[in-house]
Image (cartoon, rainbow, N blue to C red):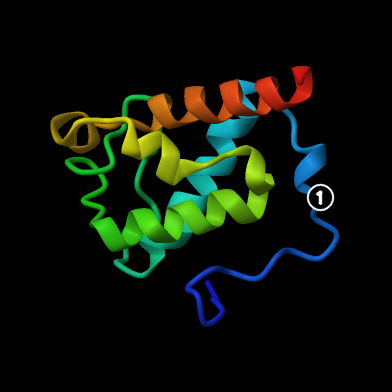
């Protein structure tokens, strides 16, 4: 994955964050793709990623990886999804136990809230 000086991958041509759907399965697929791009650096890109997959224990992601994931989420969903805000509301043990499914639920709720508002 190519990134700019801030560590964020450039926007995909023709990608419109406002047109991203709120289907949990589609969001899971999107997030799994983002994680596979991150994991590719470690040779882990074939890892099975599902709702119960944990960021720390299963994927062995470090804090810098979560920063990159945050950038990917912002690129894909725009300002409607704020990963840093989501994580800031969690205790350390909750962050360590964080699952992909919890992130999917947060993203779907954020997207639906912006559609309703």
Image position of 15 (left or right of 38): right
Residue 107 figure quarter: top right
Q: Is residue 22 visible?
A: no
Residue at 70% of width from left, 65% of height from top?
Answer: 11
Residue at 50% of width from left, 75% of height from top?
Answer: 6
User: Which element carries disc 1, helix, strand or loop?
Assistant: loop
Residue 88 figure quarter: top left
The residue pinned by badge 1 equals 16
Give the image location of residue 4, x and y in percent: 56, 79
How many C-alpha atoms fall within 10 Å of the one at disc 1: few (<14), some, or many (≥20)? few
Residue at 76% of width from left, 17% of height from top?
Answer: 116
Q: Is residue 54 visible?
A: yes
Image position of 54 (left or right of 31): left
Image position of 88 (left or right of 68): left
Image position of 54 (left or right of 85): left
Give the image location of residue 77, x and y in percent: 66, 44
The relative height of residue 43 versus residue 25 in the rendered view (above or below) is below
């Amino acid at each position: 994955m190519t990134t700019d000086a801030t560590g964020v991958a450039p926007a995909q041509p023709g990608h419109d964050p406002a047109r991203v759907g709120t289907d949990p399965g589609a969001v899971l697929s999107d997030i799994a793709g983002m994680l596979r791009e991150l994991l590719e650096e470690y040779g882990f890109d074939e890892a099975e990623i599902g709702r119960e997959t944990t960021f720390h224990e299963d994927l062995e992601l470090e804090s810098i990886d979560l920063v990159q994931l945050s950038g990917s989420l912002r690129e894909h969903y725009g300002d409607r999804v704020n990963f840093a805000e989501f994580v800031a509301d969690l205790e350390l043990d909750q962050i360590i136990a964080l699952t992909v499914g919890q992130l999917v639920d947060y993203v779907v709720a954020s997207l639906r809230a912006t559609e309703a508002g």
